[in-house]
Image: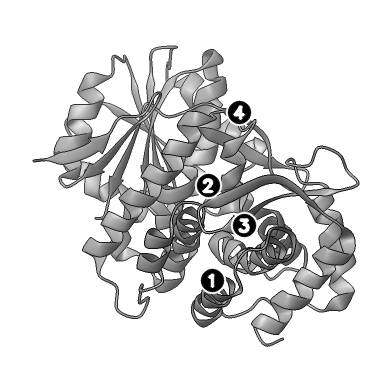
Amino acid sequence: MAHQHIEMNMQRIIKSTNLISDIEKIVAEIKHDKLFVLTDEHTANLCLPLLDPWIAVKDVSRVVIPANDTNKTLENLAHIWKHLTQNGATRHSLLINLGGGMVTDIGGFAAATFKRGITYINIPTTLLGAVDAAVGGKTGINFEGFKNEIGAFYPAACVLISSRFFSSLGRKDILSGFSEMLKHALINSEAEWKKLLTFDAGDIDYEWLTDAVFRSVSIKEEIVKKDPFEHNIRKALNLGHTVGHAFESFALETERPVLHGYAVAWGLISELYLSHRVCGFPKEELQKTVRFIHRNYGAFALDCDDYEHLYDIMTHDKKNANASSVNFTLLSGIGDIQINRVAGKDLIFQSLDFYRDSVGL
């Protein structure tokens, strides 16, 4: 069997075993006139060559933007629009996003807005991109210092997941994606959580990892299918992200940027503590998860003087109903999701204390 896939209401997820034949098949199934491939500078050099045999026989127009999340900007979005316009893209053109979450985010948003929406395909090249940004239809850019401030819900026609890209990733990039998988396991089932805690980042079994990625994506898509526009249960996917995004923004401001998945892992420590305090999340599961995170992700240094600013960042989060309280997704147990739980400032500060104690700061 060339590939297996799960059908979703808007989006096909394909676990590819033969990249070239799978992409040929998918592109042939989607009616289009012109074909465009978006990469960043890294994926243009490292990943695009894997598609060369296919690109060589197709008339594909290539768009390249600078790498890294700091380049998920209005300027680069305009660069993509300009390229599409100048190269004769129409409403019936097809855009392929080949890259990590930054490429699929900005490429998806370019597709959502160009001529009021063209079809696109995501081929995530990072573990984080595969389990997080590439699936679920959230697209966007950063604006005025806020992450993903401008965006749209606009799912890809198809997401092609190929482990050929994962084996070239460094340990940090693998771990950055793995924290999103850990989050999916926590909101899903104890069985999945236990499986993931056996992961050894020092000796990676790529076949095991690819199967785990596919299960992880299935968990996310099940939730997205029930609630595509995040009015309700999709908020489960925000676990770890309210504090995690605050860490990430703060790290950028203080010029010591961290990978998104690392920020989420550290955010999970604080938010599982809040889950324990607010919803009775069991202590043993809390401790086991925290130990796994500390062992693999180390620590992001912060002290008590930073709490006020971190809290301020959290109150700006898009997920808050109002600016004076902070909205969280918490758990009362593994797989037992509690959305729209509000925590006060004191408790949030205590959760940051817990984070610092847990990672030995």
* Camera-nearest residue between 172 and 342: 342
* Neighbours of disc 2 within 10 Å: few (<14), some (14-19), many (20+): many
Question: Residue 220 at what x, y percent from top left?
Answer: 45, 43
In three-dimensional space, the C-alpha distance between marks 1 and 3, rounded to whole angstroms, equals: 11 Å
Q: Which residue is mark 2?
A: 102
* In the displayed structure image, the side of residue 74 where residue 312 appears, left or right: right
What's the distance in space between the residues labelled 4 and 3, CA to CA? 31 Å
Disc 3 is placed on an element classified as strand
Which residue in the protein does label 4 denote? Answer: 152
Mark 3 highlights which residue?
332
Amino acid type at image mark 2: Met
Q: In this picture, is 197 found above or below 104?
A: below
Measured as percent of width and height from the top left, residue 341 is found at 74, 48
Q: Position of residue 343 (x, y in %)?
A: 81, 55
For image coordinates 20% across by 22% down, the residue present is: 28
Q: Residue at x 79, y 53 (%)?
A: 314
Cα separation between marks 2 and 1:
32 Å
Q: Quadrant of the N terminus?
A: top left
Q: Report the mark closest to the observer, 2 or 1.
A: 1
> What is the CA distance from the residue labelled 3 to the residue labelled 2?
32 Å
First along the sequence among labels 4 and 3: 4
The disc, 4 or 2, on the residue closer to the chain's N-terminal end is 2
User: Where is mark 1, residue-wise?
Assistant: 285
- Of the numbered discs 2 and 1, the one sitting upstream in the chain is 2
Q: How is the image coloured?
A: one colour
Which label lies toward us, 4 or 1?
1
User: Which residue is at a point 46% across and 51% down the rendered structure image?
Assistant: 188
* Foreground: disc 4 or disc 3: 3
At x 35%, y 77%, the residue is 200
Relative to residue 78, is residue 47 drawn left or right? left
User: Which mark sits nearer the N-terminus, 3 or 2?
Assistant: 2
- Which kind of residue does numbered mark 4 sit on? Ala
